Amino acid sequence: MIVLFTDFGLEGPYTGQVKAVFYRTAPGVPVVDLFADAPARRPKPAAYLLAAYGIWFPPGTVLLAVIDPGVGTRRAALIVEAEGRWYVGPDNGLFELVIRRAAAARTWEIPRPPGPLSASFHGRDLFAPVAAQIARGELPSHMPRQAHIGRHVDWPDDLPEIVYLDHYGNAMTGLRAPLLPAGGRLAISGRVLRRAGTFAEVPPGEAFWYENSNGLAEIAVNGGDAADALGLTIGSPVAIDF
Amino acid sequence: MIVLFTDFGLEGPYTGQVKAVFYRTAPGVPVVDLFADAPARRPKPAAYLLAAYGIWFPPGTVLLAVIDPGVGTRRAALIVEAEGRWYVGPDNGLFELVIRRAAAARTWEIPRPPGPLSASFHGRDLFAPVAAQIARGELPSHMPRQAHIGRHVDWPDDLPEIVYLDHYGNAMTGLRAPLLPAGGRLAISGRVLRRAGTFAEVPPGEAFWYENSNGLAEIAVNGGDAADALGLTIGSPVAIDF
Amino acid sequence: MIVLFTDFGLEGPYTGQVKAVFYRTAPGVPVVDLFADAPARRPKPAAYLLAAYGIWFPPGTVLLAVIDPGVGTRRAALIVEAEGRWYVGPDNGLFELVIRRAAAARTWEIPRPPGPLSASFHGRDLFAPVAAQIARGELPSHMPRQAHIGRHVDWPDDLPEIVYLDHYGNAMTGLRAPLLPAGGRLAISGRVLRRAGTFAEVPPGEAFWYENSNGLAEIAVNGGDAADALGLTIGSPVAIDF
């Protein structure tokens, strides 16, 4: 299975052209849109989202992960293998948490292809062909050496910020809920929110946080829009309140 | 064929994870996004939309229908078979009109699975696996008994409200157009609208109503946005004017 | 491969029903969403977008192209074969540039089908079945004669207007970049913009233009939203400044 994690959107031409590459060069392999609205041009929050959602997929999955504000510059192009999953995308920190949390990870730098390459759409022209090859079983074992990829040791293990807003207005943090204290509360936008198991445990209109279905601490309002109610955007800081 | 009728949106992680379940457990079965923007958290208008659009698909189709504000509560999980189509989703009224309009319908309650279940994403963890089984031909005939599902006898046969706004600004009602009087007009937002066969029959900028391509009475403005022009939202009341 | 170029959107029922037609009548043929947000109801700018993006696909591709404000009127329904690609859609100028730029093109008029036809959704009921036939290899060679299609000789070879705004806020023009003077600048919204090779060549926040990945001149702001910054919409005029 090939999984797309991008900021390309679905309605315009970008995701469709990437899928056309897959259908032509890895026919019969299902392609799943995981996120087409990952944090635009912001690899850091996207890295925490990717690490939380990528591991939901079984080993053998190929994840094309492209948040690429540096497209057209000399930033490297990477293949990362982590616990049996394959990630393909730019070397800008997007895979930092995937690698850091994996028991074992290997990385390769994708050589620049010999032919012409668009300046602005490496997702289609560089990363998708490589991801399709891996999905067909052509693993990069022939490729000579591990890349010296950029690491971001200063990034925390969990990010106390909003990393994603969904269309209901729920706000995901970069915090793994199972690592938070059992009775822990989260402070955000001048409010302190208690934890609940699910929406129905809190009165309508009340803000709370819960462990979402992929293990992240997520802020919500029962029957409402937390992002609007609390004024949240990607990057809004969250504090853990004991 | 598996058909998705949800309020999950397409760009975020929800629809993609549901499809991943289908691609893994019912490989080769096409999956169609019918509505990813059905009325969010509102099973009642969604029920009229589902009843109008579900019957367009041939018998044998499996429809995963999830508008589920009560996820995580004790509301039951259902399989409904109506005129050869299979519907899977929560017991909250979403299937009321499908059942009421069918010549014959059968229902089963989905037992709670033995393993862990996320509190907030039964679409992925409970309903999609059951829908995939049915799509593979594993019908629920082994399941012991019909569910005592919640019925909503107070809901009308046709709903005189707006049940869906499309991205052009056209507004679908919960009224079946073939049941309306031939020269009937619809009153909404203080306006009385005449019926037309198609957009080109009315002057640019004029509001009217017509029978849409799935049989619902739909309010539109030729070349314009009816929802904006008339201030319509899900639930706006419509009256039949003779 | 079947490629969709429409203003139908993805979340509502239109694209899903069209795909259901394809999955039933051309099973196994991949379907790609190229544009679901092509200029709504505006065949002229859409024609320049279609001509630029259609040729990226290999010969043999079937493109369903439906921007159809005249649905329900007597406008003809067309099949166009241009350089080995098949286009299916309404006769309203949408194929003008595809035909004009092709070394050779053939056209057929689709006869009105014998059965009932919805007044408002020919994409599903008329065009998709024909596109599916072609995708299955049933070419229209049996069809009697070339259509007398509407030509738009007054439309320019390149359109100095904005023809598409993507979700990043980048604005595509109807100008083919390789035909512009090497050092050419573009004037828009009272600003004169220089050309750059890629985003990283200009300072953050600065507007510029570049050749996008399908050869159109596109206006962007590095790290920003050009449509917002410059007040651009579909149809905004652009001038070539020497």
Image: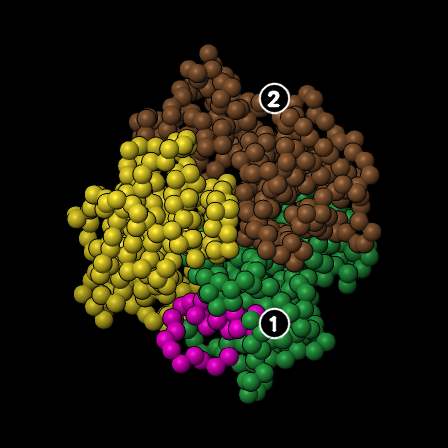
Chain colours: A yellow, B green, C brown
Residue occupied by mark 2: C157
Q: How far from the left and from the top, in percent, is residue B238?
A: 67, 58
Can you see residue B104? Answer: yes
Q: Is residue B50 above or below residue C75?
A: below
> Is B120 contained in the magenta span?
yes
**Magenta stretch bounds:** B110-135
- Choose top left, top right, bottom left or bottom right for residue C55: top right
Residue occupied by mark 1: B86
Q: Residue at x 62, y 21 (%)?
A: C156
Label 2 neighbour load within 10 Å: few <14, some 14-19, many 20+? some
In front: A231, or B91?
B91
Q: Residue at x 68, y 35 (%)?
A: C81
Q: Residue furthest top?
A: C242
Q: Is residue B51 above or below residue C166?
A: below
Q: Amino acid at mark 1?
A: Trp
Q: Residue furthest bottom?
A: B144
Q: Is residue B92 left or right of residue A85?
A: right
